[in-house]
C-alpha cells in the first residue's frame, strides 16, 4: 500500500458551518491553536531545561459563542462526540475523558477569579490524536485563547500557558512540563524556538532553508502513559535531590560525570539522559545558527539513542522508524518526538529527497512493522490566536 501523505481540508469553514447548523446562529469568534513537533530537548522541560520545538501547520480550530446561562455545549467534530455540562460543576469526567481538557481550562479560569458565562463550542482539526504532536495542548490552548477573547480577560501568554498546563495536571493526570502549551501559543513561522524552561524565555532559531521537517507517524498510539511519564518525572526529581541541586538543569555534563556514581543505576541512567540532552539541545541551536544540518542531525540521532537506552521511553515501532529514517540518503537525522511510548519520529530531510524518503521508509516500515505509517511534511507555523 502507498504510504499516505495527509491532505488538509479547510477546517475553519467546516467548523463555522457546523456551528451554525448545530446551534442556529453564527459563531462569535473562531480560533486556531497549532500542534507541535519537538526537534530536540526531550523530557527536559520539567527539569527546568531547554527544548527546541516548532509549532506545526496542523491545528485545532474552534468556533465559539457566548451563552447567557452557565451551560457549556461542546461538539468535537473530528471525534464525532458531543457533551453538555455546567460551569457550576467542573470536575474531570472519567466517562468522557475527551471533555476534560475543555473542562480543565474553564475550571482553572474560574478558579483564578474570572467569572465566565456558558459557551457553545465546536472544534476539530488535523493534529493526529495520541501521536505525540500535542493534540491535547492544542485543545487546551484553543479554549484558553477563545475565553480570553470572548470574555475580554486580557491574559498574558505565560499565564495562559501555565493555566493550560495545570488543566492537564489536574484534569488529565499527566504532570507535564510547559513546552507544549508554550509553543502552541508562541510559534513563529519558519522558526523553531529555543525555550529556557526555568527562566521562561525563548528565542527564534531559523531552520536550514534546504531542510524539510518530516514527521513519520508509526501508527502506534500511546496507551496509558500518564503513569510512566509521571514516574520518569519523579525519578528526575529524586536524582536532583540526591545530587543536591534544585533541578537537573543545574548540572552540566562535567559536574554530572564527576558525581554520577553517587546515584543508583536506574536513576543514573535517567539523569544522564536529561543532563546530556540539555547539552545536546544547546549545541543543536549552535549548529542551526551556523547552518550545519549534518551536525544537527547527528545530535538528533544521539537524542534518540539516549531516549531509547537511558530514558527508556521509546518502543519497537519508534526504534524501527528512526533507524529506517536515519539510513536514507538525504536524511540528516531522526528521533522520536514527544513523550514517547508510541507516536511519531521527526526527521530532517533534504528538500529534494523528501519523496523518495517517504516512499522508501514507508514501504520498509510497513513490511517490517505490519502497520501503515503516515507522513506529515510540516512547516513551522505561527502560534495560536483568533482567525
Ligand atoms: C509531553 C509533555 C511535555 C514534555 C514532553 C517530553 O509532550 O507534555 O511537557 O515533557 O512530553 O519532552
Image (cartoon, rainbow, N blue to C red):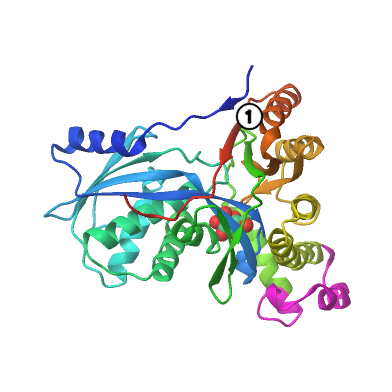
Q: Please, which residue is most extreme toward the top here?
A: 1
| In the foreground, 22 or 37 | 37
Q: Residue furthest bottom?
A: 244
Q: Give the magenta-colored segment's residue range.
A: 240-265
Q: Percent position (x, y) of residue 258?
A: 88, 77
Which residue is rendered at x = 58% and y = 70% of the image? 197
Residue in the picture at 20% in, 45% down: 27
Mark 1: secondary structure: loop
Q: Residue 278: which quarter of the image?
A: bottom right
Q: Residue 119 placed where, x, y %?
A: 21, 51
Q: Determine the image quadrant of residue 311.
A: bottom right
Q: Position of residue 64 (x, y in %)?
A: 24, 48
Relative depth, front residue between 380 and 68: 380
Q: Crowdedness of circle 1 by 10 Å Cα count: few (<14), some, many (20+)?
A: many
- Left or right, 297 with respect to 19, comes to right
Q: Is residue 88 visible?
A: no
**Quick check: can you spot residue 32?**
yes
Tell me the residue that label 1 is attached to: 373
Residue occupying the point 43% across, 70% down: 158
Q: Is residue 261 above or below residue 20?
A: below
In the rendered structure, the answer to whether residue 276 lies left or right of residue 135 reads right
Q: Is residue 329 above or below residue 239?
A: above
| Left or right: 95 as drawn, with respect to 173 | left
Q: Magenta span has 255? A: yes
Q: In terms of image quarters, where does ligand 1 lie? A: bottom right
Looking at the image, residue 97 lies above or below residue 103: above
Query: Dominant secondary structure of the magenta stretch?
Result: helix
In which quadrant of the rendered view does residue 250 lie?
A: bottom right
Find residue 280 and report its horizontal and vertical position in percent: 75, 63
Q: Residue 161 in magenta?
A: no
Q: How many marks?
A: 1
Q: Is residue 154 above or below residue 133?
A: below
Amino acid at each position: 500500500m502507498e504510504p499516505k501523505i495527509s491532505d488538509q481540508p479547510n477546517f475553519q469553514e467546516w467548523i463555522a458551518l457546523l456551528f451554525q447548523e448545530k446551534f442556529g446562529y453564527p459563531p462569535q469568534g473562531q480560533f486556531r491553536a497549532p500542534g507541535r513537533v519537538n526537534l530536540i530537548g526531550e523530557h527536559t522541560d520539567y527539569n527546568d531545561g531547554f527544548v527546541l520545538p516548532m509549532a506545526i501547520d496542523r491545528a485545532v480550530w474552534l468556533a465559539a459563542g457566548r451563552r447567557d446561562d452557565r451551560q457549556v455545549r461542546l461538539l468535537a467534530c473530528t471525534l464525532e462526540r458531543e457533551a453538555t455540562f455546567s460551569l457550576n460543576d467542573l470536575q474531570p469526567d472519567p466517562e468522557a475523558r475527551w471533555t476534560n481538557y475543555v473542562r480543565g481550562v474553564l475550571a482553572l479560569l474560574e478558579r483564578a477569579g474570572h467569572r465566565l458565562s456558558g459557551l457553545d463550542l465546536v472544534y476539530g482539526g488535523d493534529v493526529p490524536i495520541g501521536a505525540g504532536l500535542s493534540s491535547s495542548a492544542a485543545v487546551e490552548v484553543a479554549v484558553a485563547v477563545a475565553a480570553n477573547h470572548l470574555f475580554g480577560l486580557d491574559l498574558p501568554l505565560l499565564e495562559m500557558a501555565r493555566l493550560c498546563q495545570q488543566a492537564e495536571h489536574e484534569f488529565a493526570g499527566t504532570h507535564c512540563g510547559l513546552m507544549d502549551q508554550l509553543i502552541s501559543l508562541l510559534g513563529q513561522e519558519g522558526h523553531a524556538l529555543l525555550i529556557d524552561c526555568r527562566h521562561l524565555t525563548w528565542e527564534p532559531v531559523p531552520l536550514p532553508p534546504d531542510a524539510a521537517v518530516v514527521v513519520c507517524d508509526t501508527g502506534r498510539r500511546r496507551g496509558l502513559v500518564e503513569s510512566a511519564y509521571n514516574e520518569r518525572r519523579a525519578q528526575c526529581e529524586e536524582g536532583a535531590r540526591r545530587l543536591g541541586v534544585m533541578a537537573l538543569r543545574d548540572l552540566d555534563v562535567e559536574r554530572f560525570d564527576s558525581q554520577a556514581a553517587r546515584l543508583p543505576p536506574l536513576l543514573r541512567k535517567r539523569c544522564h539522559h536529561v543532563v546530556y540532552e540539555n547539552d545536546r539541545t544547546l549545541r543543536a541551536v549552535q549548529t542551526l545558527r551556523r547552518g550545519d544540518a549534518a551536525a544537527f542531525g547527528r545530535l538528533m540521532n544521539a537524542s534518540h539513542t539516549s531516549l531509547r537506552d537511558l530514558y527508556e521511553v521509546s518502543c519497537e515501532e519508534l526504534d524501527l522508524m528512526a533507524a529506517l529514517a536515519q539510513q536514507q540518503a538525504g536524511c540528516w537525522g531522526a528521533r522520536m518526538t514527544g513523550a514517547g511510548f508510541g507516536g511519531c519520529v521527526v526527521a530532517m530531510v533534504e528538500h529534494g529527497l523528501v519523496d523518495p524518503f517517504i516512499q522508501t521508509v514507508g514501504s520498509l516500515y510497513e513490511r517490517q512493522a505490519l502497520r501503515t505509517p503516515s507522513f506529515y511534511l510540516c512547516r513551522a507555523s505561527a502560534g495560536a490566536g483568533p482567525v
